Amino acid sequence: MSLSAAAGQPPASPNRPNPFGPRPGTLPPYLAGRSRQMKTAQERMKAVAENRGGIAPLFFTAPRGLGKTVLLKEVEAVGRDEGLVVASVTADSETDLCVAIAVAIRREIERMGPGLVSRIRGSLDELSLSVGLGGTTARATWRRDDAATDEPFGVALSRLVQELGGAGGLGLVLTVDELQEASQGSLRRLLPALQQLGHEHDPVPFVFIGAGLTSMSRTLARAYGFSERFEYLELHRLDPTAAGLALQAGLDSDVDWLGTAVEEAIAAADGHPYLIQLIGYWAWEESGASTALKPGILPGDVQVAISEASGEIRRIFATRWEDASDVEKAVLGAVAHLGNGTYPGIATSAGLELGETESAVRKLNDDGWLEVIDLERVAFAYAGLATYVASRVGMAPETLALGSQVLPADVTLDDG
């Protein structure tokens, strides 16, 4: 019996939508393996409801593909369910982050209705003025790194959230994705404001939750030293139990994973949330589950799904290979040869200095190529990447480390 049937959900019907998404950031049918992160975020939102102060900012970190954006979306949904005002921003290198935040906050408050806007119009305009917007809601696409000092933005943000709580009994949740992309100038204005709001003894109805690559904490520390005191929670791969839940729970139908199908999907995904979504999506499509052509998802459907997923991963990393520096490519070649290794071993194999090897590994970890195990050993994040790298650097297959040549079911990432 499927998990959905066991939960008493209605029987399946034709034209069932595919619950899995083929694109990064798509919400899964069930968010598995992130209970600690969600609990921590919910505790902060509960503190707003209970009128408690000292709500420190929270940051989720992970390499690409481990579900940071999905986690933020889930946090935002919970915040809205709790009746909080939720403003969300994705940082980029072209728009000043504080400008984007001011626009997003004003837009969300305006959605609450003209009554609330009229009661806090003064503080709304002050926040806009603190970043040079003059109270307008027009989308800003210019940089303003030198246009304001630290204090006005922080003061204006604090006054706004205090007035929001007093006028409507509301709290504000602000989420920012891809924080590592923000300019240092905007971070130098935002981070002191977060530090101040997070240490207010008087209740401040404000929660900040950010997300970014593993290197984000270093980026924030360069802009503001006290950011080292913020709380950072790292996302890791899902264990097999969580991966099984991600594939089976939360479905709106009685479609079953038959035979060894779910076990094969779990093994192929290797704990990567994005791969779980890809394999789930293509297995659903191949099975005909959307139109009830088959009784469920069969192992053969999973094999097709693995092939489709590996093709998508190949496309992604082909682009990332073109963007990689010569030093990064040398490190990738060394890891392909070694299978996994320590920083000194990789440096020796690649003919590089230890410092530049460590810097390259950090960048390659952020970009999803490599993972660092127990702080010292480095390995490829996806099975099959060694074969792909070898094909790009002209490495003979026999020089590859044993066991690093293929994806599950012998699906390789080479350009063939």
Image: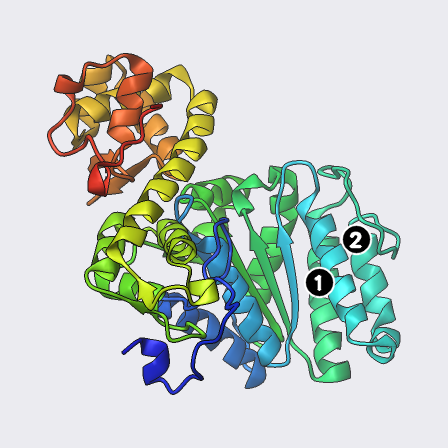
User: Looking at the picture, how far across and down is residue 297, in whole percent?
Assistant: 32, 61
Please tell me which residue lies in front, 271 or 295.
295
Residue 73 visible to the viewer: yes
Q: From the viewer's perspective, is residue 170 above or below residue 215? A: below
Do residues under tags 1 and 2 come within 8 Å of each other at their CB atoms?
yes
User: Looking at the picture, how far across and down is residue 302, in whole percent?
Assistant: 30, 52
Q: Please name the residue that numbered disc 1 is placed on.
A: 157
Q: Is residue 18 left or right of residue 82?
A: left
Label 2 SS? helix
Q: Which mark is residue 130?
A: 2
- Residue depicted at 52% across the width and 80% down the height: 47
Q: If the image is split into quadrants, where does the C terminus sit?
A: top left
The crowd level at tag 2 (other Cα within 10 Å; few <14, some 14-19, many 20+) is many
In the picture as drawn, the residue positioned furthest to the front comes out as: 293
- Residue depicted at 49% across the width and 46% down the height: 225
Q: Is residue 298 left or right of residue 377?
A: right
Quadrant hosting residue 142: top right
Q: From the viewer's perspective, is residue 136 above or below residue 367? A: below
